[in-house]
Image: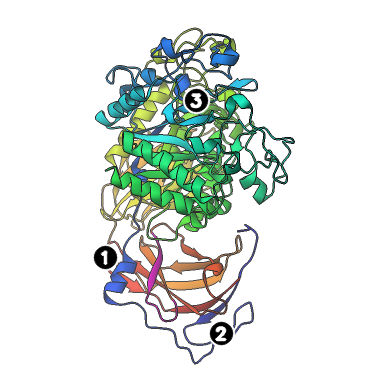
Amino acid sequence: MSRFGRGLVAIAVCALGLAGSGGARISDRLAPPAPPRGAALARIAQPPARAPLASERIYFVLTDRYENGDRGNDRAGLTGPRELTGFDPTDTGFFHGGDLAGLTGDCTGPRGLARIKDLGFTAIWVTPPFGQKYVQGDSAGYHGYWIRDFEHVDPHFGTDADFGAFVDCAHRIGLKVILDVVVNHTADVIQLPNYTYGAPKTPIVPAAERDAKRPAWLNDASNYHNRGNIDLGSCSDACFVLGDFFGLDDLATEKPAVRQGLVDIYADWIRRYKIDGFRIDTARHVEAAFFPYWAPRILAAAREAGVANFELFGEVAVTDAIELSAFVRDRGVPSVLDFPLQDALTRFAGGGAGGRGIADRFRDDDYFVTSGVAHAPPTFLGNHDMGRTAREVSEGGAGAGGPLLARTLLAYDLLYLLRGAPVVYYGDEFGIVGRGGDKEARHDLFPTQIAEWQTQERIGSPSIGTGSSFDVVNHPIAVRLRTLGALRAAHSVLSTGATAVRVASSKLLAVSRIDLAARREYLVLANSGGSTARVTVRTATPRSEWTRLLGSPPAFASSANGTVSISLAPYSSALLEATSPIPTRRPPKPKVAVAPDNLSDYVRVTATAGTAPVTIGFAIRRAGATWTRVAADDSPPYRTFLDPRRFRRREIVNVVAVARGLGGSTAVSAVRSFVPRR
């Protein structure tokens, strides 16, 4: 969908037969159906659910750079130069020695998985552990994305048994394991006469590598597109899907044998190790029909293996939320990493942008929802490709200045207190800043031999020198992460509550997180400015005291209409909980508006139902069918977006909204009829 396209829709109010912007006329002889009643009404009125992923706190680790637990596997059992072994701890682009044994530790000690659990995380996401093509060009496959053997662990990381011990330890101490997987490409083995993207080329496979990949079907060059490299600056949509990503062999995922082969590969890892979820690399570059085939079969394999609540989320490096939503709505990716919110949070915390960008991102959540499950994606601030959190916050500030540690702590506060499942990149808890993305954001936590990394500035602690990051105890970021993790563990509203933005200005942000079942309101406040600021907020909880859970505002109470005024120190945040419940009120009859969306080609359906917290269920009814719920929303503005392509030409569609108050009472809107225009 184009963000700036406009769909046309003819709108009719009840049975009045009014013509819409497209000039089509709905016959005034066609009265709309009766609104839903009884069991149908109850189904539509149900509050939205949230996927279990929303309650996770995820630690993302690059295995090669975490800890070297077994020096015997540094060279993968080989002898010779780095061009053969891939090992050179003095070069940022080669294997450094980190492995599964180091990541696991003794399962109780200070440097293994127990340390990650102690930081407040509930899950660990690890880069691909599969067998790599050790060296390609001037770099090595230390990161895990140049896969040659999809069936076994790379010898640099250990053995299959080491991976099993890692998963067993994680599960024993209460950590889920999310495995980074690749379905778009393999290691670069196929050589092409001309690497510029274009028509299919005759592939050439060096004799020494004709049987290099496992399973064997991956050695058949006809299972790849063989069109040459993607040009990220000028590629067409087809090029993004069919081209080689930085030369990596692009799989022809439209072929049934390739699709099923990728199901078989990853289903086997689930069966063998009881993994809890997959992060899907380069999901943007996979053809549209692949995930509707692959994802349900992977989820079925997890159920058969006894893995409950298996999670799938993809990497789509797009900062436009509406463009990103198409990968969920149309291309079958169950969830996606929240690149748009990363951009908004780091800019706000850095001082380079106001809170409006965060508020707009939450409004755009409605584009992702086509069922009764709310949008609660994995959220993050920095990663292995773009750069570390502190650097992202600094860059987002665009020269705004101020103490980088305080601004980075503010960013983490928002990451944990706002909606979504927070993901923290390994080493950021030690204040590593770095000087870029990719290789420059992949530091060793064990004593590094990269001279530049020894002297690079860190926030919250001195340069590391020849020491180990694990010897830095009680780093201020690590301390804050423990605090924030404990808050999310103690207050489920931070994971699964509704979101209502109250204030979003140049330096201030105020967001209510509401536990609708318990009728309890929490208030998240943030000041990204360099001076104390006073913020006035209209809450949903009148005449209540508020308990401070994080930050330093003095005690206060809300007025008769729910208004509070609070002073916030510079670069600070606060979390407050109302001691009184939100009053129950019967919701008013919702008013429904249907119009072309001005940012996409969708039809926008909006419902209003007063100012008190409610949930809104949206349902449509087509000719000869019953009322079907299409979305549920508990966070204002209450909206859903319908795709005109899903309807027949000139089809009359009926829509209704059902409001549900905090006490469970409901109110139903008038039925609106419209004709979607393509």
Gap between marks 2 and 3, in whole Å?
Answer: 59 Å
Residue matched to label 1: 664
Do the residues under discs 1 and 3 have CB atoms within 8 angstroms? no
The residue located at (38%, 41%) in the rendering is 267
Q: Residues within 10 Å of mark 2 (few under 14, many from 20)?
A: some
Q: Amino acid at mark 3?
A: Leu
Residue type of the residue flagged with mark 1: Gly
Percent x, y for residue 398?
A: 64, 33
Quadrant of the image occupied by residue 417: top left
Work out whether residue 243 can be spotted.
Answer: yes
Which range of residues does the magenta coloring cover? 622-633
Name of the residue lying farthest toward the bottom: 29
Whole-number angstrom distance, CA of label 1 to CA of label 3: 45 Å
Q: Answer with the quarter of the image where residue 378 lies.
A: top left
How crowded pointer 3 is (Cα within 10 Å; few <14, some 14-19, many 20+) is rated as some
Q: Which residue is mark 2?
A: 18
Q: Earlier in the sequence, mark 2 or mark 1?
A: 2
The type of colouring in the image is rainbow
Residue 421 appears in the picture as rendered:
no
| 457 sits left or right of 51 in the view | right
Instruction: Choose mark 2 or mark 1, whichever is in front.
Output: 2
- Return the x and y of residue 621 as percentages of the image width and height: 42, 76
- Of the numbered discs 1 and 3, the one sitting upstream in the chain is 3
Q: Is residue 571 above or below residue 100?
A: below
Q: Secondary structure at mark 3?
A: helix
Instruction: In the rendered view, tell whether residue 3 sits above or below residue 175.
Output: below
Q: Which residue is mark 3?
A: 405
| Dot 1: element | loop
The type of residue carrying mark 2 is Leu
Judge whether residue 458 is colored magenta: no
x, y percent for residue 496: 34, 48
Question: In what quadrant of the picture does the C terminus appear?
Answer: bottom right
